[in-house]
Image (spheres, rainbow, N blue to C red):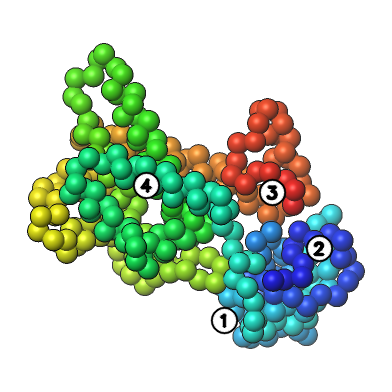
Amino acid sequence: MKKFFIKDLASMVEKEIATEFLLRNVKLSIADGRRWQDLTLSDKSGIVYGKCWSEHISDKTDNYVGKIVRVIGKVELFREQCTLRIVRITPAETYDPADFRVTLSSYDVEQSITLLKKLLDEIEDPRLYSLCCAVFGIGTARYERFLESPLTEEATHPYFGGFLKHTINVASLADMALTICEGSPNEVIRPDPSLVIAGALLHASGVLSQLTLGAAEGILTERARLLASSTDAVLMAVCTNSRLEQEKRVTDMSALLHILEAANGMTPPKTKEAVIVTNAARMSKELNSIDQIFFESDRMHPADKTRKAFCDYLGYDVFRGGEECLKN
């Protein structure tokens, strides 16, 4: 484990450091006859910006983006924010990936797994149940990837465990909608609960083929550049179903595939089940977008108390990891 993190740099101003970071970005600039590189570095506690002047620039630095690097330099204060004056960057030889991953807490993972099992048990159709279990690969290495994978590379739910969190959020919202539908005297067309829960759980499953797990973040595969995750979700369901034993296969996939296509924006929702899952997916992503803005702000500006003031105004902490971020 690292001896100190980005959140600790405020107490190390004017001190020399030699430690590891995830190199997120490098930009070469030239002005007034001088050359320098602006670098964006991170670990699990935050983001810090660094500057490497011409006498220390290496042509190899661009090749290290997305990798863990060892940085030698000095902590400086610029406009009340800690920055790094970098003299050397090399690939890190040894490191603990956990030091650089923004991830769900073990408590959140356990809670999500408990909810997943509860939601699966609500699928009364044995064929849909078998399909969901097979897609997630319960009992196999794929299941571990499902628990760890981010939902996207850098947009919504980009943290480790984000795919699990989003999947459970969407299925829980859809389950809540089913409860509302059941209690309505105006309900004419009753949605199929098994179809709704299965569609909610599987709607984003294409991500399992779209991202690989890097040392500190999800990385888009070459496949992701050719196929949309929505297409992969449909392919995942169809191909997995075809590999099930005959008596466990879903015989008519049309209703489920329509839900997957609608929830991913490929087609307008035309069934009640599709409307429920589509809106649940939209709500999960929109709420996380707000969360992500504040979370990244905390990482980039740990001394800024704007988010804390916002939460105090509301009277409660509404964003993921709030208490931990505020401690940082």
Front residue of 48 and 108: 108
Bin the neighbour count of mark 3 within 10 Å (Cα to Cα): few under 14, some 14-19, many 20 and up: many
Bin the neighbour count of mark 4 within 10 Å (Cα to Cα): few under 14, some 14-19, many 20 and up: few
- For marks 3 and 4, the one nearer the N-term is 4
Helix, strand or loop at disc 3?
A: helix
Bin the neighbour count of mark 1 within 10 Å (Cα to Cα): few under 14, some 14-19, many 20 and up: few
Q: Provide the residue designation for mark 2.
A: 9
Report the residue at 19% width, 20% height from top. Answer: 188
Front residue of 160 and 122: 122
For badge 1, the amino acid type reads: Asn
Q: Provide the residue designation for mark 3.
A: 325
- For marks 4 and 1, the one nearer the N-term is 1
Query: Residue 37, can we see it?
Result: no
Q: Cα distance, mark 2 to mark 4? A: 42 Å
Single out the mark in the foreground, 3 or 4: 4
- For marks 2 and 1, the one nearer the N-term is 2
- Decide: is 89 above or below 182: below
Q: Cα distance, mark 2 to mark 1? A: 26 Å
Residue 96 point in image, percent of width and height? 63, 73
Report the residue at 39% width, 35% height from top. Answer: 173
- Decide: is 242 above or below 179: below
Single out the mark in the foreground, 2 or 1: 2
Residue 312 picture quarter: top right
Q: Cα distance, mark 3 to mark 4? A: 30 Å
Q: Provide the residue designation for mark 4.
A: 117
